[in-house]
């Protein structure tokens, strides 16, 4: 969407949202929205995300071609609504408590997976973990 031409936000497109990257991204978006008091203009969203998390969102990583499509696919946690002028959209947090719990569970799963990977590396290469953990014999 190019805001200077006066186009409106597009309706959401159906894409399977089962990837771990998509769910982690949802958690980051919730965190970002809370930092911006639950709303931010769509034009400022990519830069705000990059400032907070150190990288830009790449919608094509999760099956979307545009940022607007990606954000509108998350309608259970955010709304993307056009402003009255019609040239800009606002992204608002509309989070239900179930979505918060789901995001928390996904983050716990990711942390657990990273921990398992680290333990496997230490077991594979004992010199990498020397002095970090007690390993029973």
Image (cartoon, rainbow, N blue to C red):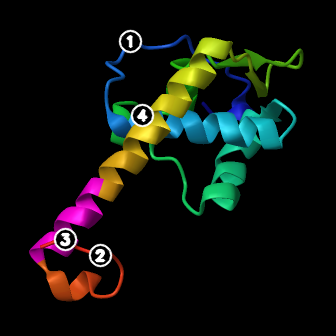
Magenta residue span: 116-124
The N terminus appears in which quarter of the rendering?
Answer: top right
**Mark 4 and mark 1 in contact (Cβ < 8 Å)?**
no
Cα separation, mark 3 vs mark 2, equals 6 Å
Q: Residues within 10 Å of mark 1 (few under 14, many from 20)?
A: few
Q: Position of residue 85 (x, y in %)?
A: 88, 20
Q: Is residue 115 left or right of residue 95?
A: left
Marks 3/2 in contact by CB < 8 Å: the verdict is yes
Q: Is residue 71 visible?
A: yes
The residue identified by callout 2 is: 134
Question: Of discs 4 and 3, which sits in the foreground?
Answer: 3
**Neighbour class for label 4 at 10 Å: few (<14), some, many (≥20)?**
some
Judged from the image, the secondary structure of the residue bearing numbered disc 4 is: helix
* Residue 14, numbered circle: 1
Name the N-terminal-most of marks 4 and 3.
4
Between the residue at mark 1 and the residue at mark 4, the CA separation in whole angstroms equals 14 Å
Residue designated by label 4: 22
The answer to which image quadrant residue 53 occupies is bottom right
Q: Quadrant of residue 34?
A: top right
């Amino acid at each position: 969407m190019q805001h200077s031409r006066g186009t409106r936000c597009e309706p959401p497109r159906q894409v399977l949202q089962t990837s771990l990257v998509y769910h982690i991204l949802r958690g980051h978006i919730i965190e970002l929205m809370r930092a911006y008091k639950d709303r931010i203009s769509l034009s400022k969203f990519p830069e705000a995300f990059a400032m907070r998390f150190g990288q830009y969102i790449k919608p094509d990583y999760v099956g979307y071609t545009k940022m607007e499509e990606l954000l509108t696919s998350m309608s259970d946690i955010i709304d993307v609504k056009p402003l009255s002028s019609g040239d800009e959209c606002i992204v608002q947090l509309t989070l239900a408590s179930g979505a918060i719990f789901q995001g928390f569970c996904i983050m716990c799963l990711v942390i657990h997976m990273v921990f398992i990977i680290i333990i496997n590396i230490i077991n594979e290469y004992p010199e990498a973990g020397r002095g970090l953990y007690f390993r029973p014999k």
